[in-house]
Image: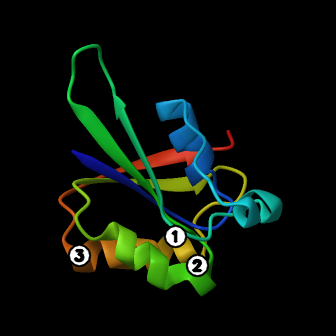
Amino acid sequence: MIVGTAGHIDHGKTALLQALTGQAGDQRQEERARGMTIDLGYRYVALAEGAALTGFIDVPGHERFIHNMLAGAHGIDLVLLVVAADDGVMPQTREHLAIIQLLGIPQALVVISKC
């Protein structure tokens, strides 16, 4: 199964995947310095002992990197639409949701972060 993130910039997509996988999401020095995902991040982890690996794709939320988000969203089985409780639904939340619908991603979960 391939699980991907979606949502507005700074709503906690990378932090969520780090919590789920135990692996840092942003690998590039520029991403860590800016505090935002620029390129796609891939993580693989077995969610239970002896289980097959689950793939996770971390996508950027900034509008300037929407083409990277679109490239990463193709082939996702389940999307985690992350919405920050202190910010609510924002422009890229809506944009990412539209992309999810256009691609026909079959399953989605809304994750409320920053509670």
Q: Amino acid at mark 2?
A: Pro
Q: Residues within 10 Å of mark 1 (few under 14, many from 20)?
A: some
The amino acid type, in three-letter code, at marker 1 is: Thr
The secondary structure type at the circle numbered 3 is: helix
> Going from the N terminus, do you reach mark 1 or mark 3 first?
1
Label 3 or label 2, whichever lies nearer to me, is 3
> Given contact means CB atoms under 8 Å apart, are the residues at marks 3 and 2 in contact?
no
Rendering quarter of residue 24: top right
Callout 3 crowding tier (Cα within 10 Å): few <14, some 14–19, many ≥20: some
Badge 1 is on which residue? 93
User: Residue 75 placed where, x, y %?
Assistant: 22, 64
Residue labelled with disc 2: 91
Q: CA distance from mark 1 to mark 3?
A: 15 Å
State the residue in front, 11 or 115. 11
Q: Secondary structure at mark 2?
A: helix
Mark 3 to mark 2: distance in Å?
19 Å
- For disc 3, the marked residue is 103
